[in-house]
Structures are given as C-alpha cells and as structure tokens.
Image: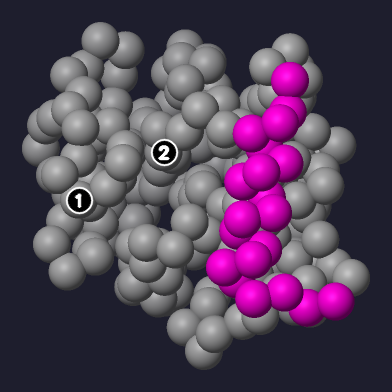
Amino acid sequence: MDQQSKKSARAAVREARKNLPDTVRTERAGQISTHVREYLAALTPVVRSVALYNSQPDEPDTETLMRQLFDDGINIYLPVCEPEYQLSWVRWEPGIELERSPRAPVMEPVGQRFGVELFEAEDGISTLFIPALSIDSNGYRLGQGGGYYDRFLPRIAHTPVQVAAMVFDEEFVPAGSYELNEYDTAVDLVITPAGVHHIID
C-alpha cells in the first residue's frame, strides 16, 4: 500500500471501524481479551498492576477486559488527561465514579492521581496498554491525534514497562503504510484477534 498521511489514514480506519457490525466487533474484542489475559498470565513474576484505557465505541472493547483482569486479581489504572497534554493515572475498580474529561472525549476515573512513579516502582505497572487506530510492523502507532501518549511514552522509556497496543487484524499493517514523525515511539507488542505479535528491534 502507498504511504498515507496520518490524516487520511485515520479517516480510513475510522470509516472501516464505523462500518464493522457490532457482532463482529464483540467477537473480535473477546478474542483480544483472551490473548491479553494469556499474555499477562505467562509473565514472571506474577503481574499485579497494568495500565489500560476506557475504549471508545468503535475501538476494541476494554470494559469487559478490565472486569476480567480485576477478577484475576490485577490492579488496573486508567489515564486522566491533564493540562499541556500530560497524563496522570487513577486506580480503577468496578463501580468507581467516572466523569467526562474536560480535555478529551473520554470518561475518566475519579480518585487519587499518580504520575510516572507508578511505572518506575519495582512492583508497579508491568504493561501499559494504549489505544491505537493502527500499528505498523515496526511497532509505530497511528493514534487519534491528541498527542497525550506521544508525550508520555518517552517519560517511561527508561523503565522495564512493556507497551502494548490493541487493534483489529487488518489494522496491523506493513511498515511504511503511513507517515511518521520524529516524536513517534514504537510499542513492544501488538495484540489482535489473531494473537500477540512481539515487535523485534
């Protein structure tokens, strides 16, 4: 496929997601959730905490996954959009209050906010799952365009945290499918309905 601008690539993925039947979306999200749980269960030592996100209607669903991971005994943290495109993190559990972000079209948990220290602690976050519209085979992400994760990922580059993106199979595309910028940061793994894809440097 010819290289696309990020704007046109985003539009194409959004249109395809919008046209995806709900039954197919639900089935695929269930397959992704299964692979996520298998991946986390295989990690050593036992995973205690992960960072996730509240999915949008056209994204692979994370609500069910969050409840499953909570039942697995894993602590879950969700992002809060802060001024100057920064992120903080709040621990989530079923029933926690959520409110509409004043800075982005997402629902955010209400509670004590944590920063990068959550990812630096020895018993802190093991894997950060981030939203994406598409991921190329080198691990470079096509995001929504807000820039929050572009600014956050370099702040945890020195930590052992694994960064994972969850997309549908057709959204895991060859390298060079869309333009990249100097601030783009590659993820470590991509999880699709087909399985877990590790990005090899």
Q: Is residue 181 above or below residue 63?
A: below
Residue at mark 1? 103
Front tag of 2 and 1: 1
Residue at mark 2? 53
Which x, y percent locates residue 105? 31, 41
Kind of residue sitting beneath label 2? Tyr
Kind of residue sitting beneath label 1? Arg
Q: Is residue 152 magenta?
A: no
User: Which element carries disc 2, helix, strand or loop?
Assistant: loop
Mark 2–mark 1 distance (CA, rounded to whole Å): 15 Å
User: Which element carries disc 1, helix, strand or loop?
Assistant: loop
Q: Dot 2 surroundings within 10 Å: few (below 14), some, or many (20 or more)?
A: many
Q: Is residue 177 above or below residue 130?
A: below
Q: Which mark is residue 117?
A: none
Depth check: 65 or 13 in front? 13
Where are the magenta residues, as a range? 2-21
Disc 2 or 1, which lies upstream in sequence? 2
Which x, y percent locates residue 112? 10, 37
Q: Is residue 114 left or right of residue 147?
A: left
Q: Quadrant of residue 39?
A: top right
Give the residue displayed 21% in from the left and 17% down from the top.
96
Give the residue displayed 62% in from the left and 46% down from the top.
14
User: Which corner quadrant holds the N terminus?
Assistant: bottom right
Give the residue displayed 72% in from the left and 74% down from the top.
4
